[in-house]
Amino acid sequence: MSPMTDTRTEQLLTTGEAAKLLGSSRQHVVNLCESGDLPFLTVGKHRRLRREDVEEARARTTRSNRADRRSRWLNIAVAGELVRDPDAVLERARTNLALLQSRHPRGRGAMWLSEWEKLLNGPIEDVLDVLTSQTPRSRELRANSPFAGVLSSEAREQALLAFQTHRHSRV
């Protein structure tokens, strides 16, 4: 996070206070900070969060829309393929990523593609977390996903049908 210039005019919160505002655990707030989803300032050895950032996070993490849920459902199917055949899926993702990066060398898309590059070169568990997580960061990453073509047409249709069935059974 960039340094805050004047903390006297901003209300800084502890992770516990932020957790109360978000209706979550303190550990969840710490995890959001560590994943980059929630900016923070370190004061001594303690994290401090701007109330404004916590309020924004609360607005972002409220109920996801249908498109977000559908995307996550498809990416959970991709995660299944990744677990089943990690080498082939990661190879496909890296090939797609190189193509996407050549087409989108600047802007926010390029930023998310750079994040994917780091993820694909790191522990596979981190990739699985992004594919299945409901965090705002994961939603953004999935919107710029390099996993096109991992699911066969049949597997994709099955996942979408299951999503539709599940969605209607909850109403």
Image (cartoon, rainbow, N blue to C red):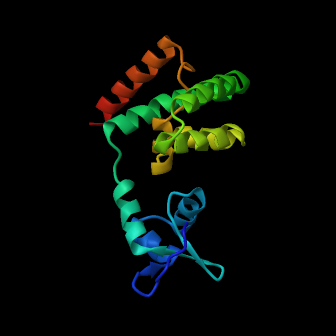
Above or below for 118 versus 27: above
Residue at (45, 32) in percent of width and height: 73
Residue 155 higher or lower than 120, as above or below: above
Q: Is residue 105 visible?
A: yes
Image height of 56 relative to 10, above or below: above
Closer-to-camera residue (6/43): 6
Q: How many marks?
A: 0
Q: Between residue 76 and residue 4, name the one nearer to us.
A: 4
Quadrant in which residue 126 is drawn = top right
Expressed as whole percent of the image width and height from the top left, the position of residue 122 reads: 72, 42
**Quadrant assignment for the N terminus:** bottom right
Q: Is residue 11 left or right of residue 96?
A: left
Q: On the rendered structure, is 166 left or right of 38?
A: left
Q: Quadrant of the C terminus?
A: top left
Residue 6, given in percent of the width and then of the height, sits at 46, 83
Q: Residue at x 35, y 54 (%)?
A: 62
User: Is 11 situated left or right of 99 in this image?
Assistant: left
Q: Position of residue 42 (x, y in %)?
A: 60, 76
Kindly give the residue lying farthest to the left in the view shown: 171
Q: Nearer the viewer, residue 22 or 5?
A: 5
Q: Residue placed farthest to the bottom in the image?
A: 8
Q: Residue at x 67, y 37 (%)?
A: 120
Q: Residue at x 73, y 25 (%)?
A: 87
Q: Does any portion of residue 146 appear in the rendered image? A: no
